[in-house]
Image: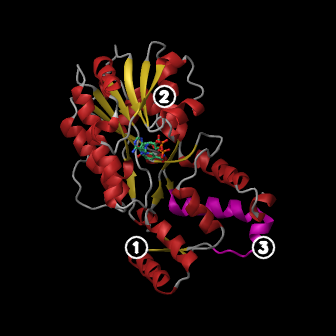
């Protein structure tokens, strides 16, 4: 793979994909990248920072369509030139129902694999997955765990797990790069794209949720875009990462849930307007009690409370399923671990205050 100079990348319009593409092009001045996008016009209007445009070839396609809906001449060019595919595109919505999540993440990956295997030289596939394919498993999660025996918290996790199995079974050569949850760009704490974590933090910041699932030993594993994108760009095409599953996770640098709550509520309490509201920390409960709390809201709560509880239900239960992601492969291949969560959590909170500048709390911050 080291002689590879033509790749196909999917998901390059997304948070991680655009950073990965930029890094791949910078690292190899001979690299040409076919970029699978759903809307070429939109891509051409928004693509920036990719240097020499002749090295980036947009191709219209859709994971949900047979043959990825790639035009025959474009498919022929890909099959002739490409010998590696970096596959990031996904439906990343935690609340998607299983059929929707599978349509994009599982069946879409099957179509990417069909394309990879149609290439003149069957293409290596670097599949970007989530560490939370581990689902409801607890304890130390080895990078090479393969059995799904605990179930999942949401359909996103399940569909990504199923896609991983397809990659391992069908790709001529593969690497699986599993990211933890990205919460900010880098050590500056800047948040370019908000996700469920930020929405949950905002709900707790406003005192809208009285409970949080968790147990003794719960930790929060999170990463920065820059760590994950660097890891993907450095490992996607490397021979010594082929056949390996790699956890791009904080691992030992995950923060115990109680410490994270201490840091977070202390930060918020330093804001006079927030302190005045007398918002109390949520009660940490086991999953059974949290489910009872959810059921009560669903029975007697108003529409907005139901919406809030519904949004949280798709991922906060992970907090009560304590796990530590082993990062042996990642550390060995990258020569360093991920930045500990403690390093970027406070800057990230501060950045969120800036993002919420219209709210009274943020104005004081
Ligand atoms: N960000 C995280 O915290 C995180 C954590 C763990 C794992 N991951 C994994 O990392 C990868 C990238 O995540 P991200 O956060 O960068 O995602 P994102 O910002 O949500 O972007 C998703 C990308 O997938 C593309 N896409 C979605 N549906 C598609 C379809 N039917 N056909 C073609 N392209 C489609 C989107 O294209 P459009 O522009 O057309 O919508 C976009 O480029 C995903 O595989 C995700 O599972 C992310």
Pointer 3 or 2: first along the chain: 2
Q: Is residue 60 above or below residue 54?
A: below
Q: Residue at x 38, y 63 (%)?
A: 321
Mark 1–mark 3 Cα distance, whole angstroms, equals 31 Å
Q: Which residue is mark 2?
A: 21
Q: Residue at x 23, y 45 (%)?
A: 165
Q: Residue at x 81, y 60 (%)?
A: 364
- Rendered image quadrant of residue 326: top left
Q: Which residue is mark 1?
A: 287
| Residue 204 visible somewhere in the drawing | yes
Q: Considering depth in this image, is 224 or 294 the residue closer to the camera?
A: 294
Mark 3–mark 2 Cα distance, whole angstroms, equals 46 Å
- List the single residue furthest toward the left: 169
Q: Is residue 258 magenta?
A: yes
Q: Which mark is residue 276?
A: 3
Query: Along the horizontal axis of the image, is 228 left or right of 4?
Result: right
Pointer 2 or 1: first along the chain: 2
| Chief SS of the magenta region | helix
Q: Secondary structure at mark 3?
A: helix
Q: Secondary structure at mark 2?
A: helix
Residue stretch in magenta: 256-280
| Residue 335 visible somewhere in the drawing | no
User: Could you tell me if the residues under marks 3 and 2 are in contact, i.e. CB atoms within 8 Å?
Assistant: no
């Amino acid at each position: 793979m080291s002689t590879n100079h033509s790749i196909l990348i999917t998901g390059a319009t997304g948070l991680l994909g655009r950073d990965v593409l930029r890094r791949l092009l910078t690292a190899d001045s001979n690299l040409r990248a076919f970029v699978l996008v759903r809307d070429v016009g939109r891509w051409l209007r928004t693509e920036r920072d990719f240097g020499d445009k002749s090295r980036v070839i947009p191709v219209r396609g859709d994971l949900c369509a047979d043959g990825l809906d790639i035009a025959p001449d474009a498919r022929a060019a890909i099959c002739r030139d490409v010998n590696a595919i970096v596959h990031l595109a996904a439906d990343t919505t935690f609340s998607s129902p299983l059929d929707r999540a599978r349509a994009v993440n599982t069946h879409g990956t099957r179509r990417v694999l069909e394309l990879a295997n149609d290439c003149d030289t069957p293409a290596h596939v670097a599949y970007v997955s989530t560490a939370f394919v581990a689902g409801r498993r607890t304890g130390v999660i080895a990078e090479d765990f393969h059995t799904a025996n605990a179930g999942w918290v949401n359909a996103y996790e399940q569909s990504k797990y199923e896609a991983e199995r397809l990659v391992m079974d069908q790709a001529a050569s593969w690497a699986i790069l599993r990211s933890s949850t990205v919460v900010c760009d880098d050590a500056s704490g800047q948040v370019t794209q908000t996700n469920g974590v930020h929405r949950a933090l905002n709900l707790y910041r406003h005192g809208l949720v009285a409970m949080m699932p968790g147990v003794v030993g719960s930790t929060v594993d999170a990463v920065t875009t820059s760590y994950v994108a660097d890891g993907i760009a450095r490992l996607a095409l490397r021979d010594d990462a082929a056949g390996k599953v790699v956890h791009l996770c904080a691992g030992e640098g995950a923060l115990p849930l109680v410490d994270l709550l201490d840091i977070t509520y202390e930060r918020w309490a330093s804001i006079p307007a927030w302190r005045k509201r007398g918002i109390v920390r949520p009660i940490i409960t086991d999953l059974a009690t949290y489910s009872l709390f959810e059921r009560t809201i669903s029975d007697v709560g108003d529409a907005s409370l139901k919406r809030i509880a519904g949004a949280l239900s798709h991922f906060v239960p992970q907090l009560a399923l304590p796990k530590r992601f082993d990062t042996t492969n990642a550390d060995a291949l990258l020569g360093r671990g991920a930045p500990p969560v403690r390093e970027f959590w406070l800057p990230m909170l501060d950045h969120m205050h800036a993002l919420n500048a219209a709210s009274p709390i943020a104005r004081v911050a």
